[in-house]
Image: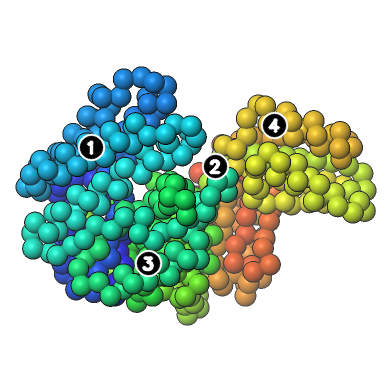
Amino acid sequence: MIVCKFGGTSVASAEQIQKVANIVKSNPARKIVAVSAPGKRSGDDIKVTDLLIQLANAAVQQENTEERLQTVVDRFRAIADGLGLDNAICDVIAEDLRERVQGDKTNVELFIDSIKAAGEDNNAKLIAAYFNAIGMPARYVSPKEGLVVNDLPERTFALPEAYANLAPLKDTKEIIVFPGFFGYTKAGVLRTFDRGGSDITGSILAAAVEAELYENFTDVDCVFSANPKVVNDPVEIKEITYREMRELSYAGFSVFHDEALMPVYKIGVPVNIKNTNNPSAPGTRIVPSRPATGRPVTGISADSGFSTLYVSKYLMNREVGFGRKLLQILEDENISYEHTPSGLDDISVIMRSNQLTPENEARIISRVKEELHAEYVEMRHGFSMIVIVGEGMRHNTGLAARAATAISKTGANIEMINQGSSEVSLVFGVLQEYENRILQALYEEFFAHAKA
């Protein structure tokens, strides 16, 4: 059995969904299809998820929601019309949206989750209807039928019983069309995964049915060694390990959600990134291990939007529990961290800037000064993380020096260096303004003049 997931651009229009049907039909092993909400049809278009967020915000603010609701229904109606479906499916979608808009708003976060999930949920219903209309026996399956997730306040993840609940899908005779992006708590409350979470849903399904392959269809032929919007004609990656892909996805590779690898990684299901618009292209395979190549670096990625909490205190290294107490202050503010490079008398905690507000930032600084008696505390903003990834890095000496030399040629200062014990990745913290120049310089160093 093959589980395949189709992203937003792959299901953005009737024409795209027809391509999806042809892909699924071409291989009888493709029995489970996870789908996203309709994405952009062109560069200046608006994703259905964004339209739904606007609808949710209007409902929360007690504004008239009818016009925004009709805008969403009209997007689905355009798709249904293009596929030759009757208005019945659009009536189902409109009724579903109205029920959601009239839902409980006591918890605003959960209410907005419910509205956002309508994109994937209703698109799955529409696509199942289309498959049946063209003679492909299909069945829409709701995440209510087994995708059990945790309760607030933690970020959403599938509970262990979700895999057992979904395992019977492996015996399906029909094509299962399953909406991505969300699940339900044991109490029946809808919760969404992080944005891009349809990748996670597909991975959960692939693990649950122990699929031979998880195909993730998007709008690119493969994964590239660097961002093609920054680097001209980057090298294509034909095969990459789970660990390498996880590191690259974390730091800006938008082709595959960084949390989506764990379910398939645990049982060894290979992943194939493929292009809906060019399905014959081999794509990029993500596997447990791969043969060594002559190139130590597999890919280079960059992500912006980081902040650093810098703390200085003399003899910090002698103070038992200092790091724990510092991280406890962040935990109390519900803030996660990415890296913690440190010295004898100072430590930096790297975190995503979108977790910070002027209020919690002030509280953090005040508590670090008062409770930890730090001599200097500062929150710095505007950082990017540049990540060099490769399974072959641990077997090559001087790689960090080569990277640092390439970065120095751009005129940028390296604010932070971090390398994990696995030696699969090397992270440089730099000012955001230098991100693209550094990415180009590192690509030139490790790819442009190197042999494949």
Q: Quadrant of residue 35?
A: bottom left
Left or right, 328 with respect to 304, comes to: right
Please state which of residues 252 and 105 is positioned toward the viewer in this rendering.
Answer: 105
Q: CA distance from mark 3 to mark 1?
A: 27 Å
Under circle 3, the secondary element is helix
The kind of residue on which mark 4 rests is: Glu
Task: Give the labeled residue for mark 3.
Answer: 166
Residue 179, given in percent of the width and then of the height, sits at 31, 53
Give the mark nearest the N terminus, 2 or 4: 2
Question: How many marks do you count on the picture?
Answer: 4
Q: CA distance from mark 4 to mark 3?
A: 42 Å
Q: Give me the residue at 50% from left, 66% from top.
A: 160
The kind of residue on which mark 1 rests is: Glu
Residue 437 seen anywhere in this rendered image of the structure:
no
In the drawing, what numbered circle is on residue 95? 1
Q: CA distance from mark 4 to mark 1?
A: 43 Å
Give the mark nearest the N terminus, 1 or 2: 1
Q: CA distance from mark 2 to mark 3?
A: 37 Å
Dot 4, crowdedness within 10 Å: few (<14), some or many (≥20)? Answer: some
The kind of residue on which mark 2 rests is: Ser
CB under 8 Å between callouts 2 and 3? no
Depth check, mark 2 against mark 3: the one in front is 3
The kind of residue on which mark 3 rests is: Leu
Give the mark nearest the N terminus, 2 or 3: 3
Residue 211 seen anywhere in this rendered image of the structure:
yes
CB under 8 Å between callouts 1 and 2? no
Under circle 2, the secondary element is strand
In the drawing, what numbered circle is on residue 361? 4
Depth check, mark 2 against mark 4: the one in front is 4
Q: CA distance from mark 1 to mark 2?
A: 40 Å
Please state which of residues 206 and 65 is positioned toward the viewer in this rendering.
Answer: 65
Dot 2, crowdedness within 10 Å: few (<14), some or many (≥20)? Answer: many
